[in-house]
Amino acid sequence: MNSSLQGYAAAIIAELDASNLATVTAELAQLDATMAANRDLRAAMTDTSVTGVARRAVLTQVLSGKVSAPTVRLAGNAALVSNAQDVPAAISFLAQRAREADRDGGYDEPTLSVTGARQRVGGFASATFEDLDNSDLEGIEEELFRFARTVEATPELRRAMIDRDLPVNRRQGIIEALVGSKASPSTTKLLKYVVAGGRARDVVGTVDWLVDQAAKARGWRVAKVRTGKPLAEAQADRLRTSLSRVSGHPVELQVTDDVTLLGGVRIEVGDLLVDATARGRLEQLREHLEADHRTFQKND
């Protein structure tokens, strides 16, 4: 099962009270059954030509208003991070995961490789980061970095953190005592999950990796927009809504007017680049014509 989804599910389910957990458990069981019985829905989710972002958007739209918000988030993340052919199995995993939490009240994460464990912690972080703004993320980034350096510089603390024989709740208690009053609740929650979902011998490496993830998450919350002419307020609102839907969280626009673009808009959000400017289209056309010309010369 996708390790990122494991962590994401752990974060969402941990925040549910008994009543809401029972609701989410029933809804995921129903979605699992619907996914198995509804050919059209299954085909849409397993279409390898559709991106994960598009699958999440479709499933979120289908479920919104019909099930609770945590169920929408869990199912949407399953559609986003899983390979297309694995989406039905991911929904089944979520249904089973919620059922176990509802029945037993706890869940022990299975042992994974270092890479898999980091990705699982990353999934937990993704769920934690979704409702935070850039200032919150910047603070978390700094707090995580300080904790990693403290562990490195304190042999006794490092020995406790990497001791696989020390129960998870004991190691989490050490973290709570050390940073509970000095760091944000989100940072403390992340650090405690590093112990539960990560590898004991990789605590510092995992926390440093989370520092990078927080920085990337901050980048995905700012859209750098260059436009050939000023955006009307309604246009900016529509663009903000569309980008928020794609990225999965609120997006802040940083708009720069640039008459050299000759019209249209150029957008950068994290790793995503959309060039819909007149100049961009002209450059693409020029490159296409030059490629055709080179091919013509070779064949002449």
Image: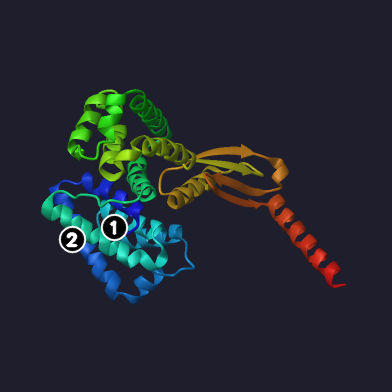
Query: Quick one: quadrant of the N terminus?
Result: bottom left
Q: Secondary structure at mark 2?
A: helix
Residue 273 point in image, percent of width and height: 58, 49
Residue at horizontal 77 percent and vertical 62 percent from the top: 291
- Left or right of 169? Residue 56 is right
Q: Looking at the picture, does residue 259 appear above or below residue 177?
A: below
Residue 118 point in image, percent of width and height: 37, 45
Residue type, mark 1 in image = Gly
Query: Quick one: quadrant of the C terminus?
Result: bottom right
Between disc 1 and disc 2, whose residue precedes?
Answer: 2
* Residue holding disc 1: 65
* Residue holding disc 2: 26
Residue at horizontal 36 percent and vertical 27 percent from the top: 152
In this view of the protein, which residue sits in the foreground, 224 or 177?
177
Residue 196 point in image, percent of width and height: 25, 42
Residue type, mark 2 in image = Ala
Circle 1/circle 2 CB separation < 8 Å:
no
